[in-house]
Image (cartoon, helix red, strand yellow):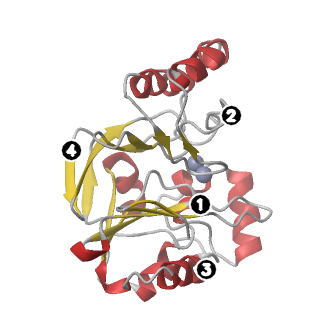
């Protein structure tokens, strides 16, 4: 489990026929106040927990799970994680938190065809993703935990309640599935997605100084080129405004 800094750990996703999101653990271990970002795909909870333990982090110091968004490849193993960390709170942007609390799983599966496929593949029953959310985020919050400060930025478009987490002094951005390495962006055809909103969100992120990009999938980037997010947004602009 690579350590990005004193207060950021990266557990790479283990993709199968469906991608498994990367998981990040934020906070200095000595603080005993860690946050786990995006558990990952259904079935991957054991692997993620093992990786945390191998790093020598105490499970009891993980106080909460924060979702960048609630697609299956990010929240699929939340209940597996919760069995190991029954005390952990769940923090989600309010627009996706409401869906989870109502048991409306459209935001988890994204499309009907995918729902049928995944329920069959993983033996998931309807209602498997009905959860109470302990803290509903709206964007604009400054979260202080684990001896670090993270800003919450609402960046809808890939999903309605996507958030980014930004560590201003270390210039670290965790954008979920909004922007990836290699000038790639998240898809914008699933439930709650919005191409124009995604463009606006990219432009918002483009204003930040980012040195380390820790996306939900694929490569993580240290030493991000200047204006990388702006260039990415420009590259996709005609697709995002043309539909
Ligand atoms: Zn996603
Ligand atoms: Zn994803």
Q: Distance between the Cα atoms at labels 3 and 1? A: 17 Å
Residue contact between numbered discs 3 and 4, judged by CB atoms under 8 Å: no
Q: Position of residue 68 (x, y in %)?
A: 44, 51
The residue closer to the viewer here, 203 or 6, is 6
The residue closer to the viewer here, 152 or 54, is 54
Is residue 109 among what the camera can see?
yes
**Measuring 30% from the left and 44% from the top, which residue is drawn there?**
152
Work out whether mark 1 precedes mark 4 in sequence or the reverse, and give the earlier one: 1
Residue 72, numbered circle:
1
Residue 141, numbered circle:
4
How many residues crowd mark 1 within 10 Å: few (<14), some (14–19), many (20+)?
Answer: many
Q: Distance between the Cα atoms at labels 3 and 4? A: 31 Å
Residue contact between numbered discs 1 and 4, judged by CB atoms under 8 Å: no
Q: For mark 3, what is the residue?
A: 47
**Measuring 55% from the left and 27% from the top, which residue is drawn there?**
225
Q: Distance between the Cα atoms at labels 2 and 1? A: 23 Å
Q: Classify mark 1: helix, strand or loop.
A: helix
Task: Indicate which label's residue lies in the foreground, 2 or 1.
Answer: 2
């Amino acid at each position: 489990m690579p350590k990005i800094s004193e207060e950021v750990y990266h557990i790479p996703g283990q993709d199968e026929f469906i991608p498994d999101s990367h998981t990040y653990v934020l906070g200095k271990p000595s603080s005993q106040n860690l946050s786990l970002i995006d558990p990952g795909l259904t079935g991957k909870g054991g692997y993620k927990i093992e990786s945390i333990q191998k790093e020598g982090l105490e499970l009891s110091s993980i106080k909460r799970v924060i979702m960048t968004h609630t697609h299956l490849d990010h929240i699929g193993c939340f209940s597996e994680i919760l069995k190991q960390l029954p005390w952990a709170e769940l923090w989600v942007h309010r627009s996706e938190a409401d869906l989870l609390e109502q048991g409306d799983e459209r935001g988890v599966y994204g499309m009907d065809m995918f729902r049928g496929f995944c329920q069959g593949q993983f033996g998931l029953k309807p209602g498997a993703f009905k959860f109470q959310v302990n803290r509903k985020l709206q964007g604009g919050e400054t979260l202080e935990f684990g001896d670090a400060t993270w800003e919450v930025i609402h960046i809808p478009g890939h999903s309605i309640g996507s958030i980014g987490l930004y560590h201003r002094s270390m210039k670290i951005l965790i954008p979920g599935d909004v922007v990836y390495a290699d000038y790639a962006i998240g898809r914008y055809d699933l439930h709650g997605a919005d191409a124009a909103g995604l463009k606006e969100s990219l432009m918002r992120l483009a204003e930040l100084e980012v040195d380390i990009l820790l996306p939900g999938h694929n490569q993580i980037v240290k030493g991000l080129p200047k204006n990388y997010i702006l260039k990415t947004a420009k590259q996709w602009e005609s697709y995002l405004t043309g539909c």
